[in-house]
Image (spheres, coloured by chain):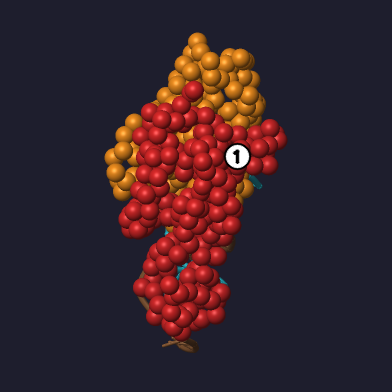
Chain colours: A red, B orange, C brown, D cyan
DNA sequence: CCTACCGATCGGTAGG
DNA sequence: CCTACCGATCGGTAGG
């Protein structure tokens, strides 16, 4: 299923989205001008409006194209393990790899939340939901008899939340906090999650 | 230690900070103009500059005055319980009450991260750190012999992270996800954390 | 796809 | 002379 080679028009659009993405995550949405996007994508200001209705439309395209689910969903679907513990650890490692390749992902989500009050999230959610449901079901099958009595949806929600927890506390504590707040922090936090969901033997 | 009754100057400054806070969390930093701040605080634009060096200086004051730690630290320090489990559940309940009274807190932190790359966080951290250390020590004393072998700093970090996890996944899933993602979600997530940190008997 | 602009508004500062 | 603050306007830039 190779995509057809993109048309000239598609390539131009893509260059705008790429330039806008870099500027938005670095400067914020209101902190970025259409002139900057035009300059970075090597086009005239007026030309942007041949591809997009306006600035918000550009962000919408950036949000859909650069949302971390593009990396996260394959990572979760490829996670493997003979036991729940192995599967969760493998999934966590794949999440870290996936998100590590996209250091901008939090900024992108913050802009969507603060500047747009999550206006584009509903459309995205419907796009992702079928795959998300599949992951929930696979996980709850493997975990039968081994997991505590917690709804599968909550297991997935807290697994995803784990990475918000880790990355945001990292930003806040960061270089300010003593090293014991950071040393092996992700391993410990995944470990706490794992022991939290597994039935005691 | 009652504060002296504020001077006229202090009251004016406080009105500016209050108005700016409301506008920033609703519209974002770049989405709010000094003119709007002036209008909302009932002052002339030029007068703002008798109280602040500029717009960023206004945000700095907003961030310091409205940071959720003002509610969170007392909540954590007042948490009580005979066992670790009781203490954690009480602390979690107090956190929810504290953060529930400040529905703007996430937006404020997001602006600081996205627009200022956490430039003001270091100063705030130093201000909070002594109390934070006290909480860590109290917690690790009570937990001796009952907690798994996890550094106390990590326990505190993941406890704080729990609320980022909960509130951000709530924003993302929100009204889009089926109800099983939301029903009793916080209770379940606190429960997973608790079982994750307690030694198995 | 670009140049040349628009109505308005930006953050910040002038003199008094 | 000071402070606190005013109405008016500065040079540039916003989205379109």
User: Which chain does tag 1 point to?
Assistant: A
Q: How many marks?
A: 1
In this view, A191 is above or below A39: above
| Figure quadrant of residue A62 | bottom left
Left or right for B193, reference A118: right
* Residue A4, visible in the rendered structure: yes
Q: Residue furthest top?
A: B82
Percent of width and height locating residue C16: 54, 59
Q: Which residue is mark 1?
A: A186
| Residue placed most toward the observer, A59 or B23 | A59
Dot 1 falls on a residue whose secondary structure is helix
Percent of width and height locating residue B145: 61, 14
* Residue B194, visible in the rendered structure: no
| Residue placed most toward the observer, C10 or A52 | A52
Percent of width and height locating residue B100: 39, 32
Q: Name which residue lies at 32% across and 55% down.
A: A126
In this view, A120 is above or below D3: below
Q: Name which residue lies at 53% across and 76% down.
A: A41
Q: Name which residue lies at 59% across and 52% down.
A: A97
């Amino acid at each position: 299923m190779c995509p057809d080679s993109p048309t000239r028009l598609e390539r131009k659009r893509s260059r705008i989205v790429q330039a806008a993405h870099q500027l938005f995550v670095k400067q914020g949405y209101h902190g970025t001008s259409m002139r900057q996007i035009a300059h970075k994508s090597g086009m005239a200001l007026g030309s942007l409006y041949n591809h997009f209705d306006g600035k918000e439309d550009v962000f919408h395209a950036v949000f859909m194209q650069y949302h971390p689910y593009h990396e996260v969903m394959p990572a979760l679907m490829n996670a493997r393990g003979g036991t729940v513990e192995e599967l969760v650890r493998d999934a966590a490692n794949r999440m870290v790899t996936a998100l590590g390749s996209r250091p901008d992902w939090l900024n992108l989500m913050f802009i969507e939340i603060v500047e747009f009050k999550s206006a584009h999230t509903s459309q995205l959610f419907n796009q992702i939901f079928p795959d998300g449901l599949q992951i929930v079901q696979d996980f709850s099958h493997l975990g039968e008899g081994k997991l505590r009595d917690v709804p599968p949806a909550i297991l997935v929600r807290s697994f995803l939340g784990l990475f918000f927890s880790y990355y945001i506390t990292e930003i806040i504590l960061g270089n300010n906090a003593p090293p014991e707040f950071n040393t092996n922090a992700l391993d410990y936090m995944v470990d706490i999650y794992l022991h939290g969901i597994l039935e005691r033997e």
